[in-house]
Amino acid sequence: MGGDIYIPPKPKPEYKSEYRYALWYFTYNKYTNCYEKEFNGEVSDLLNRKFNYAIALEVKEGSDIPQSGFSYDNGYNDGKELGKWVDQYLRGIDYFVAIPYYRKGGDDKGEKRGLEYWKGYVDGIHDNTSDYQIGFYWNLEYPNQVKDEYITDFELNELSEYIRNERHQEFIWIPYLNDIENPDNTDIKTLSKYFDYVFVQPHYYQAWKYNYLWNCKKDASDDERESWKSKVKKYKEYIQYGRTKLLDILNWIKEIPNGYIEMEVDGQINDFPDLINRACDYIILRKSLTGRDIWQRRAYYFDIKKEFIDKVRGTCPEW
């Protein structure tokens, strides 16, 4: 009627696209001198599970990727060989290729391949792959890599400029948190400017996994048990405070303008089913975090089996 006030319908919330990045592992067989795929599926299996991207990385943080030398040409030839091999498997989904920090067989500070090698490696992959190859992943997860002199700011900036401005590709990083009591005690925030996206590994799932292993696997070797014990101690606040501590870490990740989350699960869910709930905690807390959405882009570590994804999503479909 004439006196009625028109109230427009409440607008529907604007849908934001979500982007999922799958960690796709490979290895190098030193006996056959060939690369080998570790993931137990195909590109179609990733697409059917709503993944938009794959990240091709070697299982030993790049240290087993063949290295013919330290020059640009050495890097180019090594990248060319890997690029041609990866592309035959990942053509069909946009993907990133890991850049190995460690020299062949190395695993310690300073055992790096070097800037000229990395530039050649980038070009070798870029020039010998299809348009599905859209960027690179920095394969050094260590969060204090400049502070502890694994690499310099200059080197990382040069590599970033080369990839992003000269080759017009994306550059991403997935560091782990090694100090949840004081996450600012890392290089993650200061180094984030060199990357398009930084996916932080909270290591919450791992804390619970090692807690179960330590308490239940009494027949393991002394070395294994000591390793589990040290990791439980490092991440003890996750065990003590559960989701409350994880939420603190997620809020810390949110402070990084281009910071996002890595989802985490592995085969230990077969032995300790409660770990599925711990994996689900990562997505359950999305409802508790206000402000910038760190789940809009998310990387996924699921070991090498697609079935682990399905098991978690059987409990929390939005994972």
Image (cartoon, grey):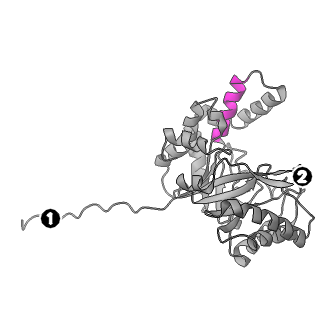
Tell me the quadrant of the picture where the N terminus can be found. bottom left
Q: Quadrant of residue 20?
A: bottom right
| Camera-side residue of 3 and 88 | 88
Give the structural element (helix, strand or loop) at label 1.
loop
Query: Judging from the image, what secondary structure is the residue with disc 2 in?
Result: loop
Is residue 29 visible in this depiction of the protein? yes
Q: Which residue is mark 1?
A: 5
Query: Where residue 240 sits: x, y (%)?
Result: 62, 32
Mark 1: give few (<14), some (14-19) or many (20+) Cα within 10 Å: few
The count of marks equals 2
Say which amino acid is labelled 1: Ile
Q: Position of residue 28 (x, y in %)?
A: 82, 52
Q: Estimate the x, y position of residue 77 in percent, counting from the top left.
A: 86, 69
Residue 51 lies, with reference to residue 128, above or below; the image says: above
> Does 225 appear above or below 197?
above
Q: x, y (%) of residue 50?
A: 53, 55
The residue segment tinted magenta is 204-217
